[in-house]
Image: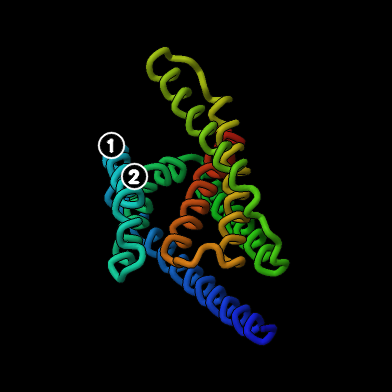
Amino acid sequence: MDQQTLAHQQVMTADTQKVLRNTYMLLAMTLAFSAVTAGISMSIGLGSGAALIMSLAALALVWFVLPKVANSAAGLPVVFLFTGLLGASLGPILNRYLAMQGGSEIVMQALGGTAIIFFALSAYVTTTKKDFTFMRGFLFTGLILVIVGAIGAMIASWAFGVDVSAFSLAISGAVVLLMSGFILYDTSSIVRGEQTNYIMATVGLYLNIYNLFTSLLHILGAMNDD
């Protein structure tokens, strides 16, 4: 019985390592693809309206299409389409920051900060094997509150002309903390063998990185009198 248990644990460890390896490999490829589509979007001067449509299309893919094909070969092109659309949607934002004085430094600082946070947190989880899945309820509650707050701020700004710049900055700060928590949670789920689908794991980590980068960009831009 002990030998069977040990053999089972060894198989689980091998499977977990495979999922983790495939996840990081696919994540690296999708991030590179997003960088390419963002570059194309910037070069053609994609408008904000088109970028919004691309973002909505990407969300539709991840909500309605990907769950149905995540366990098949069809999941990979859907993931690349999803990440490509989100990458392209960054074009107008990046062009706006790059047009500012010192804008290139702001973008590089946001990229560097995102990379440092992601690699540090991921390395911590994979090294220590600590369980962060207990954070699930707190993180999803926080995410809902942030979404509600962001929608409320947009309505207040567009419909009533309220200055929500300070509140928007606070939302970005909350997103940075939440995405850091989600990186811990999602990585822990993979390491503990709870997430066995590397495609869905990749999408989760990609969204963490994407939201972390855009929030850091907003915060750094505000600190530089954006």
Q: Earlier in the sequence, mark 1 or mark 2?
A: 1
How far, Cα to Cα, is label 1 from label 2?
10 Å
Residue at numbered disc 1? 49
Quick one: label 2, few (<14), some, or many (20+) residues within 10 Å? many
Name the foreground residue: 73 vs 223: 73
Q: Secondary structure at mark 1?
A: helix
Q: Is residue 198 above or below residue 167?
A: below
Name the foreground residue: 137 vs 143: 137
Residue 55 is labelled as: 2
x, y (%) of residue 217? 53, 43
User: In this image, 117 relative to 84: left or right?
Assistant: right
Q: Is residue 42 visible?
A: no
Which residue appears at 63% of the width and 55% of the height?
184
Q: Quadrant of residue 48?
A: top left
Q: Closer to the camera: disc 1 or disc 2?
A: 2
Which residue appears at 59% of the width and 47% of the height?
136
Name the foreground residue: 131 vs 187: 131
- In the orientation shown, which residue stands out farthest toward the front? 1
Q: Quadrant of the N terminus?
A: bottom right
Q: Secondary structure at mark 2?
A: helix
Q: Is residue 151 above or below residue 215?
A: above
x, y (%) of residue 33? 37, 63
Quick one: label 1, few (<14), some, or many (20+) residues within 10 Å? few
